[in-house]
């Protein structure tokens, strides 16, 4: 079989993606299990997309991103979102210097490569907006000056599915800016045992710094070159359209259950995330498996359900499952 | 009779007397001054004036003078002169009378206003004379019986409803006879030719043969060739084994085949080889050699031939239509 430019691209990817295994290995030195979360962190890193993590406390969300930052030799910030947090606490502010007799910029914790916005729904809308605007624009304005945020810039926001009292749920438009919404589940029994052993021993596991931010930027460029055939584009479009017009895709049963379907951002992010996924799998082209692998994480926060759906206990996961099982694979 | 004619000519001269008032002229003219009792006569009313005239047209009851009856009236028709400076309005009344004698149609007043003058003026037509005479009865001849009503010939439109009803009755009677005969013979009312349902393997082999004849890859349509080949095989797997292959990826199809009984490892490897080659062509711009293109088709035919037994077995066991639950992603 003769492969033209894809063969060359595959070889490049083989070279450039070598660090993926190293990162995964280093991550697993510290994090037990959570393979899915680690893989999604890498997708976000390679596709330049932010991630919303949802899981109960104690599932190593903070540890995962902190470890990732240490592996990449990048700056890490953790911001605990609370009801009294102000936008200035996040992006920074102007402070008057008596010595210099002028206002000086004091940059906030957002000026880091990896941000962990812990429990983002505990802060009011103005703080959420400040973060989400920075995520979108990748720059922050303090006073008269505009500052570019460092690259790579990856925000991991967490949401706690329990204790919803006194929270400010993210509006749909804001949630749409997150490339992936990852649901983190509990480790299995075997992993749980390993976690116990690791935490009660004297030896503290630590990840080594193995790559630099420039390597990530270079890998991102290669990941964007991954070939995405027109048939795959059609498959992505069909999946997204099935969430908007279910009746056109033999899913008439979902009529009246979906209040709004996935946005065009879903199509863009499905393409980008599947390219990153193919890169992680050391492939120079996207196959339908890649789309199916990332579809839940890309679409689950982009499908709105009606009251009828909630009354019937139908979740966005059910809808995505049914869409993937109904839309013809190219 | 001669006297009547002379009087008639006199009346005609009198009829249609015109009235002039400044630039306005109104007339009332009878078609004829002498009519037979019960006959119709036209009375033409006319107003002529400047184009800015606003006229209050005279209205009539059903009778004029009690004996002259208005049996029809046209709409008031307006027309302008070529230079659009003068306006002309006309109306025709259709009159009749059932009493003989001389009648004088009175002056008919026309009220009008000429823009921009706001004063309302009146102009009247002249008198018109109408003589209504009877038939002279010849008392010397014998009395004849009264003539019956005249028969008007029938038109096609009048006959049409009866024709349609007759046709419907004939069709209904024929349909009833046809239905009773069918019932007696115990035959179905409509013969629907049963569609020959091919077995999934027959259909697949037929489609594969068609694909071979079309020589797609030989014409450079390699991607189309592999897409159609995999679609045929996926449809075969779906129809034959109840695996929803059209909605599954290569990996999922292989996984499902491996899970179900009746497939040897060699058979599964064959499908895997075809699907993976097709994936490379469809999604990675791969260009297989001519030998590889030939091989995938023959491997596909081999796969179908080797699994006919499984399909037939499953059909006999009645499990062909049992769709397994779709894989959860």
Image (spheres, coloured by chain):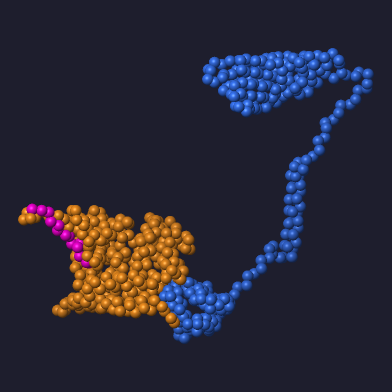
Residue plotted at (73% across, 23% down): B42
In which quadrant of the rendered view does residue A112 lie? Answer: bottom left
Q: Does A110 sit left or right of A292 as displayed?
A: left
- Note the chain letter of the orange one: A
- From what the image shows, is residue A323 above or below residue B243? above
Horizontal and vertical percent for residue B276?
Answer: 44, 79
In which quadrant of the rendered view does residue B198 lie? Answer: bottom right
Q: Is residue A111 magenta?
A: yes
Q: Does A235 sit left or right of B300 as displayed?
A: left
Q: Does B22 sit left or right of B92 as displayed?
A: left
Horizontal and vertical percent for residue B71?
Answer: 71, 24
**Whether residue B236 is visible:** no
Residue plotted at (34% across, 70% down): A224
Magenta span of residues: A101-114
Residue plotted at (62% across, 18% down): B24
Q: Is residue B296 magenta?
A: no
Horizontal and vertical percent for residue B218?
Answer: 53, 78
- From what the image shows, is residue B192 above or below residue B207? above
Residue situated in front as seen by the camera: B214 or A145? A145
**Whether residue A99 is visible:** yes
Q: Quadrant of the N terminus of chain A?
A: bottom left
Horizontal and vertical percent for residue B20?
Answer: 65, 15
Residue situated in front as seen by the camera: A120 or A230? A230
Point out the residue furthest to the left here.
A99
How many marks the image carries: the answer is 0
- From what the image shows, is residue A273 above or below residue A147? below
- Note the chain letter of the blue one: B
Residue plotted at (91% across, 18% down): B139
In which quadrant of the rendered view does residue A113 lie? Answer: bottom left
Residue situated in front as seen by the camera: A113 or A122? A113
């Amino acid at each position: 079989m003769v492969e033209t430019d894809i063969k060359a691209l595959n070889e490049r990817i083989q070279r450039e993606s070598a660090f993926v295994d190293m990162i995964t290995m280093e991550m697993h030195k510290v994090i037990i299990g959570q393979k899915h979360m680690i893989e999604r962190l890498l997708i976000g890193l390679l596709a330049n997309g932010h991630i919303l993590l949802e899981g109960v406390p104690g599932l190593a969300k903070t540890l995962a991103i902190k470890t990732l930052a240490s592996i990449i030799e990048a700056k890490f910030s953790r911001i605990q979102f609370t009801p009294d947090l102000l936008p200035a606490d996040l992006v920074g502010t102007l402070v008057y210097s008596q010595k210099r007799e002028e206002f000086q910029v004091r940059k906030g914790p957002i000026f880091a490569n990896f941000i962990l916005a812990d429990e983002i729904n505990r802060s009011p809308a103005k703080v959420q907006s400040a973060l989400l605007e920075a995520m979108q624009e990748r720059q922050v304005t303090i006073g008269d000056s505009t500052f570019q945020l460092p690259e790579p810039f990856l925000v991991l926001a967490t949401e706690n599915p329990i204790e919803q009292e006194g929270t400010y749920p993210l509006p749909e438009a804001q949630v749409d800016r997150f490339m992936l919404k990852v649901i983190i589940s509990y480790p299995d029994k075997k992993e749980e045992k390993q976690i116990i052993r690791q935490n009660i021993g004297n030896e503290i596991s630590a990840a080594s710094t193995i790559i630099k931010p420039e390597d990530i930027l270079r890998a991102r460029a290669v990941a964007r070159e991954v070939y995405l055939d027109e048939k795959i584009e059609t498959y992505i479009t069909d999946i997204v359209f099935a969430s908007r017009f279910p009746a056109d895709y033999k899913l008439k049963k979902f009529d009246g259950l979906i209040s709004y379907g996935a946005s065009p951002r879903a199509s863009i992010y499905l393409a980008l995330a599947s390219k990153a996924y193919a890169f992680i799998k050391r492939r120079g082209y996207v196959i339908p498996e890649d789309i199916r692998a990332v579809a839940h994480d890309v679409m689950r926060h982009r499908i709105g359900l009606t009251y009828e759906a909630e009354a019937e206990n139908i979740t966005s996961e059910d809808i995505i499952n049914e869409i993937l099982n109904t839309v013809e694979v190219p | 009779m001669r006297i009547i004619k002379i009087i008639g000519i006199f009346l005609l001269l009198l009829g249609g007397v015109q009235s002039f008032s400044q630039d306005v002229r109104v007339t009332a003219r009878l078609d004829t001054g002498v009519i037979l009792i019960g006959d119709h006569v036209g009375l033409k009313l006319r107003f002529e004036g400047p184009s800015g005239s606003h006229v209050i047209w005279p209205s009539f009851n059903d009778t004029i003078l009690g004996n002259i009856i208005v049996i029809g009236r046209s709409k008031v028709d307006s027309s302008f002169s070529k230079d659009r400076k003068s306006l002309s309005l006309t109306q025709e009344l259709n009159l009749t009378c059932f009493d003989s004698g001389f009648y004088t149609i009175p002056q008919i007043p026309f009220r009008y206003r000429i823009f921009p003058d706001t004063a309302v003026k009146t102009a009247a037509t002249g008198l018109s004379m109408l003589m209504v005479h009877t038939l002279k009865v010849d008392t010397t001849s014998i009395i004849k019986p009264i003539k019956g009503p005249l028969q008007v010939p029938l038109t096609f439109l009048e006959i049409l409803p009866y024709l349609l009803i007759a046709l419907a009755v004939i069709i209904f009677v024929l349909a009833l006879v046809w239905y009773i005969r069918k019932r007696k013979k115990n035959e179905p009312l409509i013969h629907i030719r049963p569609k020959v349902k091919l077995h999934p393997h027959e259909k697949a082999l037929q489609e594969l043969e068609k694909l071979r004849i079309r020589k797609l890859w030989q014409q450079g349509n390699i991607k189309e060739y592999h897409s159609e080949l995999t679609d045929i095989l996926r449809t075969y797997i779906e129809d034959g084994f109840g695996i929803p292959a059209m909605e599954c990826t290569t990996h999922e199809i292989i996984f499902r085949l491996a899970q179900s009984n009746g497939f040897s490892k060699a058979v599964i490897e064959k499908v895997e080889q075809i699907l993976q080659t097709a994936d490379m062509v469809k999604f990675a711009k791969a260009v297989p050699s001519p030998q590889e293109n030939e091989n995938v088709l023959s491997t596909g035919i081999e796969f179908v031939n080797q699994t006919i037994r499984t399909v037939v077995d499953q059909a006999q066991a009645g499990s062909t239509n049992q769709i397994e639950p779709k894989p959860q992603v």
